[in-house]
Structures are given as C-alpha cells and as structure tokens.
Image (cartoon, rainbow, N blue to C red):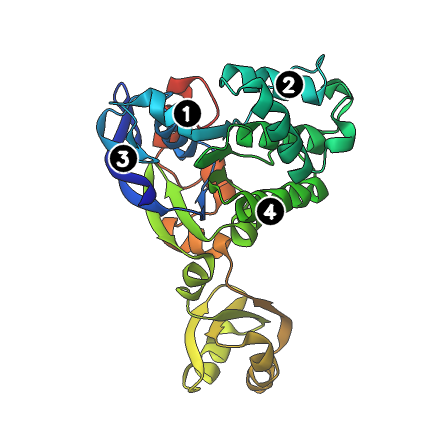
Amino acid sequence: MNAIEVEGLTRRYGDVVAVDDLSFTVERGGILGLLGPNGAGKSTLVNTLCTLLRPSEGTARVAGHDVVADPDAVRAAIGVVFQEPALDEELTGAENLRFHARLYGIRKARRQERMETVLDLVDLADDADKPVGEYSGGMARRLELARGLLHEPDVLFLDEPTVGLDAGTRKTVREYVDRLNREAGVTVVLTTHYMEEADALCDRVAIVDDGTIVAMDAPDALKASLGGDVVHVGTTDPSAVERAVSEVSWVRSVTVTDEAVVVGVDDGEARVAPLVTLASEVAGVTTVSVDRPTLERVFLSLTGRTVEEAETGGGGDGRATAAVASDGGDDR
C-alpha cells in the first residue's frame, strides 16, 4: 500500500488556483521532497493532505484514509512539523513532549517510553529538562521532530523544516531527518526551496511551480535529464569558437551568448583542455568554468526561471503571488 495517493487534487482560493489537478503517489518508507519557491503551492498541498484545508476537487488518501471522509483517522496517522515554531518556550523539552502525548491519548505507561525513544533519536535526552527558551534554533527544531514522531505516525510532514537556520544547522537537521526515516521507518514528506536539501535527503523530488508538479523523479534522474555537464568558455569571438567546436563528436550542444560559448558535454572536467585548445586556435579565451547538473538547473530548464526569480516574480505570471496573498501566509 502506498503511504499517500493523490488523484486530481485541486485547491482554489476564490478565482486563484493554488494547487492545480495534482496526481501522484508516495511509497511507504520513502522521503519525498516538494521542491519549489515560496508561493508555488507546496504548503497548500501539505495542509490539504493534513486535513487543515479541504480540497476544492479531487481526492487524497493518507495512510489509507480519505482526507475528507475520514479526517480524524488521517490526523491520528500523521505527524506534522510546521514552518513556524510551535513549542512552549516556558516549558522544558520533556514537558512539551508530555503535553503532546496527552493530547494524542498516549497512556501514561507508554508515554515515558515513547518520550525516551524520540529524545534519543534526536540526541536531546541530556537536554530534556531544560526550558525550550534556552534551546538553540537547531535544538528546538529537533525537539519538534521528536514531537512529530511521539505517537508513532505512519507519515511525517515537514513544512520547510530548516528555514531560518544557518547552513551548518540545516545540515544537522537534515541528518536527523534521514536518521528518523531509516530508524523509525516513517514516510517523510517535506517542502523545501533549498536545492541542496532536496538533493541530499530525498529519494524522490517533485518540482512544484505555480500549483503544478512539473516533474517528479529521483534527484539523480532529474539531473541526468539535462544531458551532462556544461562548459562555459568566455571568448573574444563567440561565433568563431562556436564554429570550431560544433563539429566535434563529443560535443552535445553549443549555445552562444554575447561573450561566451556554452558547450554541453559528458565529463566536463575532462573536456576543458581540448575545448580551450580548440577555442584558442580561433579567438582569445578569457574565462572557463564547468557547470555540473543540479536541481537548480533542472528547475530552470523546466520553468524558464530560477527559484530566486520565481520567488521575486521574475519571469512568472503572478499566480503564485496571488495565491499567497489570498491565503494570508507564506506559500500556504
């Protein structure tokens, strides 16, 4: 059985379509990343799967339960870590977990055992009796992960789990998410706009833009779809260099800009020297760089803009921005 099954799911805010006719499945035990800019519809999708929003059209089943027909069963089967912190800073870490356990009806005899287990998973056992207000940002995020796992959910939803954290802490939190997935066996669905996070952590990545999934596959497969590395050759005469390299058998593609030639090849580092030799025979070479396939490049190739441009409205149609405004939040 799949952990999640979505068919024709649509969510509207008035005339604005925030999630547009999505269909996909998530296998049990995997990590799916919903990758895209703020405003793309990622959090709207997660909130719908968590029963916080009702779909306008279509169906969704989480852990075998319909999100509309049986929302209580869905809520009992999932854990959620929201983008905004939701801990009581005046309580200790253990007290936060104990309160959450009581809300989920975990019996007292089982409660302490589960608390010890999840605190060990996130390496907070020694800090359980400290007020959360004394925790670092990374420690607080790890406590929220522990809380999300306390009632042994089938699926754990993480909405931008590392937003606002520094690069080193983001890496640590990613490692804990991977550990939770492997050791607790929980299916993880996370939203992120950090390309390296999706690449390093996820088994599959769904690239989300303007409420639609434009591609969904393993990160390596998505990057392989670009067809190899790209070598940028800065030159005084791009047209002459284009002619010189176009007929070479191992050159996959050639694109000319005002000051450079962009050459698509396999194993870019090995091709730098012969490309520079060829270019130097017909023009001056000013710069050379190798660009390997990345999820950022995949997003660019599929949408015609970078994630940063999508977030700032560059090259977009404004629909995602309208969806955010209509919902009063960041990508919700």
Of 16 and 4, the residue lying toward us: 4
Of the numbered discs in the image, which one, if any, rests on residue 76?
1
> Which residue corresponds to the image point at 59% horizontal and 22% vertical from the top-left?
109
| Circle 2 residue | 96
Q: What is the secondary structure assignment of the residue under circle 3?
A: strand
x and y, in percent, of residue 106 in the image: 52, 21
Whichever of labels 2 and 4 marks the residue nearer the N terminus, that label is 2
Whichever of labels 3 and 4 marks the residue nearer the N terminus, that label is 3
x and y, in percent, of residue 126 in the image: 78, 31
Q: Amino acid at mark 3?
A: Asp
Whichever of labels 3 and 2 marks the residue nearer the N terminus, that label is 3
Tell me: 163 left or right of 42. right
Instruction: Tell us which disc is closer to us: 3 or 4.
Output: 4
Measure the C-alpha gap from mark 1 to mark 3.
Answer: 27 Å
Q: Amino acid at mark 4?
A: Arg
Q: Amino acid at mark 1?
A: Ala
Instruction: Tell us which disc is closer to us: 1 or 3.
Output: 1
Measure the C-alpha gap from mark 4 to mark 1.
Answer: 22 Å
Q: Amino acid at mark 2?
A: Asn
Tell me: 54 left or right of 95. left
